[in-house]
Image: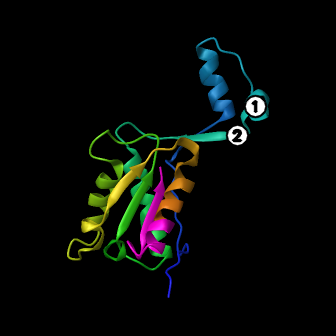
Amino acid sequence: MSSYSRITGTGSYLPPQRLSNSDMVARLAQDGIETSDDWIVERTGIRARHFVAAGVNSSDLAFEACKQALSAAQLGPQDIDLLIVATSTPDMVFPSTACILQHKLAQLSPEAGGIAGAPAFDVQAVCAGFIYALSVADAMIRAGNAKRALVVGA
């Protein structure tokens, strides 16, 4: 019987500070840069964006999204045997954001092994990173190298 992969839970997290295009236009105007909501939407499709507070890292955002995904899948960190983080904004070069996230997740259930001993690594492939990370997880599951992977884009 061959292994296959499927998505059993998803989660997301956005930092609470939200700036609309109007907010951005006002901020840019203070620096003498003229633009408009219409100009921004026409070129980017963006109407608002979220900003992190000082000291908040990619692993912090990923941690919140992972808690939701694990809950949706009715799993705990101890059930995960592979962690892949797709990011172009790592917390630092070394250790990887995945290893930092792994440590944070292990603290949720320190009595259980699971994720604490699982392979964990970052994938840095810009916009395609999350899809690439999913395909790597799928390949590892199909090859029998993992049973449950947690893939996060941050």
Q: Quadrant of residue 147?
A: bottom left
Whether residues under marks 2 and 1 lie with C-beta atoms below 8 angstroms apart, the answer is no
Tally of numbered discs: 2
Left or right for 47, reference 106: right
Residue 52 at x, y = what percent?
45, 41
Q: Considering the numbered disc 2 on the image, is that residue within a helix, a strand or a loop?
A: loop
Residue at the outermost top position: 32
Amino acid type assigned to the residue bearing label 1 in the image: Arg
Label drawn at residue 43: 1
The region drawn magenta spans 138-154
Q: Is residue 12 magenta?
A: no
Name the residue tied to disc 2.
47
Which dot marks residue 4? none
Q: Position of residue 51 (x, y in %)?
A: 51, 39
State the image coordinates of residue 125 (x, y, percent, origin top left): 51, 44
**Closest to the observer, 3 or 127:** 3
User: Which residue is more in the foreground, 147 or 67?
Assistant: 147
Q: Is residue 152 magenta?
A: yes
Q: Quadrant of residue 110?
A: bottom left
C-alpha distance separating marks 2 and 1? 11 Å
Relative to 59, say whether 49 is above or below: above
Q: Residue furthest left?
A: 111
Q: Residue 56, percent across and down? A: 37, 43
**Relative side of 118 to 40, left or right:** left
Q: Please, what is the three-letter code of the amino acid marked with disc 2? A: Arg
Q: How is the image coloured?
A: rainbow
